[in-house]
Amino acid sequence: MNYRKRFTVPSTAKIDLTKIDPDSTAEFKSKKHALAKLNENTKLLTELQYKLYAESKQSLLIVLQAMDAAGKDGTINHVMAPMNPQGCRVCGFKAPSTEERAHDFLWRIHKQTPKNGEIVIFNRSHYEDVLVARVHDLVPKKIWSRRYEFINDFEKMLVAHNTKIVKFYLHIDKQEQLSRFMKRLDIPEKQWKISDSDYSERAYWEQYREAFEEALSRCSTKHAPWYVIPANHKWFRNLAVSEILVETLKSMRMRIPEPSVDLDEIRKLAEKETR
Ligand code: ATP
Ligand code: MG
């Protein structure tokens, strides 16, 4: 089945995340069964990104949002690995600086959108301004409640500039988050990742869920869909994201440009030299 259809958030009704199983692995029983597909997607991503870069007429923006420890970093690692670094870039968004806060919330975002031929992954994004900003009352409701509309208009404008947009919400449950935090505590190489806020934000799980539900429902549009990816199993999360990216890139129908020089002429010159 087409993964884009399967995991997309319908724009018609409000999504209920408690009804979506974060443990799902679709038609795959185990990682072993999915290996062939994972490898095939890796190869396809390399080829498709090469085409996008060569054509240089369109771009792809990938937005990643999730609760802490849901695997944004792991997903980025997996998705970027097959790609040529010359044509792709990751951009993380932390709490805005004083300078950024003195502008509208999309100012810092717009500067990082992809140029023709490029793939950009947003590790967090403008959606933080209707997530953390809402959960922690960083701005009054009067302000954040208008942002959904501004986001939709902004994304529509990017699409008009040939930027394809895909947005992933990595869906884990509260129990899985806790067990990942516990693992981090026990593995010395992972301890540096732990921050105070990770744990304290758990107390706001329900508020974040509601904020996500509203953002996903109101901002999943035909031109910039949201996908909810079951992410309790890392291998399935990677598979589903790569599958949707492959399907998306294929739908963009990139074409490698015709050569801009007379190949016969150059071939003749080269052959002369080898004689
Ligand atoms: P990791 O923990 O995996 O290194 P991260 O993305 O969680 O990556 P952190 O430095 O832990 O990075 O968190 C970034 C913080 O910035 C988050 O708490 C997030 O909510 C906050 N943030 C991002 N955008 C905004 C925003 N627009 N307004 C307020 N806070 C924001
Ligand atoms: Mg963090």
Image (cartoon, rainbow, N blue to C red):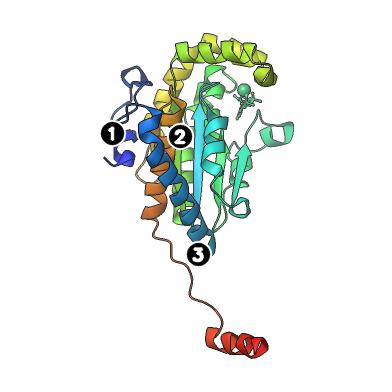
Q: Quadrant of ligand 2?
A: top right
The answer to which quarter of the image holds residue 91 is top right
First of labels 2, 1 by sequence position: 1
Q: Earlier in the sequence, mark 2 or mark 3?
A: 3
Along the line of sight, the residue nearer the viewer: 37 or 155? 37
At numbered mark 2, what does the secondary structure look like: helix, strand or loop?
helix
Q: Residues within 10 Å of mark 1 (few under 14, many from 20)?
A: few
Is the CB–ligand 1 distance for label 2 below 8 Å?
no
State how far apart marks 2 and 3 are (Cα). Answer: 26 Å
Residue corresponding to mark 2: 238
Q: Position of residue 24 (x, y in %)?
A: 34, 24
* Disc 3, SS: helix
Please indicate whether residue 43 sits to the left or right of residue 15 in the image. Answer: right
User: Mark 3 and mark 1: span between their CA atoms?
Assistant: 35 Å
Q: Can you say which quadrant of the picture contains the N terminus?
A: top left
**Is 60 located above or below residue 167 in the figure?**
below
Q: Which mark is residue 55?
A: 3
Residue drawn at point x = 56 percent, y = 23 percent: 133
